[in-house]
Image (spheres, rainbow, N blue to C red):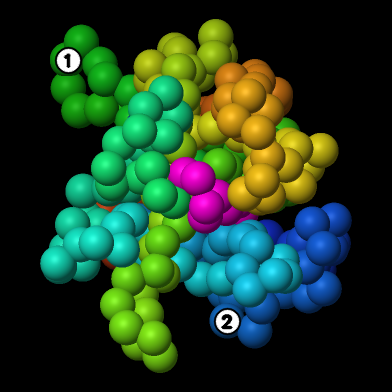
Amino acid sequence: MCGRTSLANVPEHLRIFLAGYGIPDVPPWYSPRYNIAPSQDQMLIVERDGRRQVRAMRWGLVPFWAKDPSIGNKLINARCETAATKPSYREAFAKRRGLMVVDGYYEWRKNQTGPKTPFRIHRGDELPFTIAALWERWGSAGDELESCVVLTTAANEAMRLIHDRMPVIVGKDAADAWLNRETPATVIQEIMTNDISDLTAYPVSHYVNSPANDDDRCWLPSGT
């Protein structure tokens, strides 16, 4: 499960990161976000119209065949084990794989008693990383909604202490293959099952529970 993310790096750091993926600059619409919730825009690196680009896409996939975009409210995470065959995802899985740019995500750990404990999960150096995503276009030309879904996998040993699922992390060396629709299925499967995560986690306060709260207090360790 992945229910919230963040991308709050200063533009200079983000610019360097995106350059490594062939993106020349930070998009003009970028604004630091500490608590990105489903139905809000995520930053995705995609290959569209023959070139690599970065797009703002609504988190919550709306399949091209959907009658109503509200279906996206339920499609924020997709299991990597079944995404290639599920009707909601298989078209996007085959043709529209993307990389969601984040510098962390939040997960809630169940406790024996009391409310769940939110954790912030991030790189030790606080730099961005990319999560495997699928994306879709919905609506008529000129009035299209672009939306996305996060791919999840079984949690590795470290993250299993918090939740049994985690996002699929895609390293820079696998980005070209992931974005290329011609990449063989065996290679895509290998990318989704490689455990390259070097993430760390710490508990944060319940302040992050509300999507309305979107400032650096979301990152404060619990008890501070």
At 52% across and 55% down in the image, what residue appears? 96
Side of 4 where 105 appears, left or right: right
Residue 210 among those drawn in magenta: no
Location of mark 1 (residue): 113
Crowding around mark 2 (Cα neighbors within 10 Å: few <14, some 14 to 19, many 20+) is few
Looking at numbered disc 2 in the image, what kind of residue is underneath it?
A: Trp
Look at the picture and state if 133 lies above or below 81. below
Look at the picture and state if 123 lies above or below 128. above
Pinpoint residue 116: horizontal percent, then vertical percent. 25, 27
Query: In which quarter of the view is residue 139 placed?
Result: bottom left
Location of mark 2 (residue): 29
Look at the picture and state if 12 lies above or below 154. below
**Residue 73 visible within the image:** yes
At 54% across and 14% down in the image, what residue appears? 156
Residue 98 among those drawn in magenta: yes
**Residue 102 visible within the image:** no
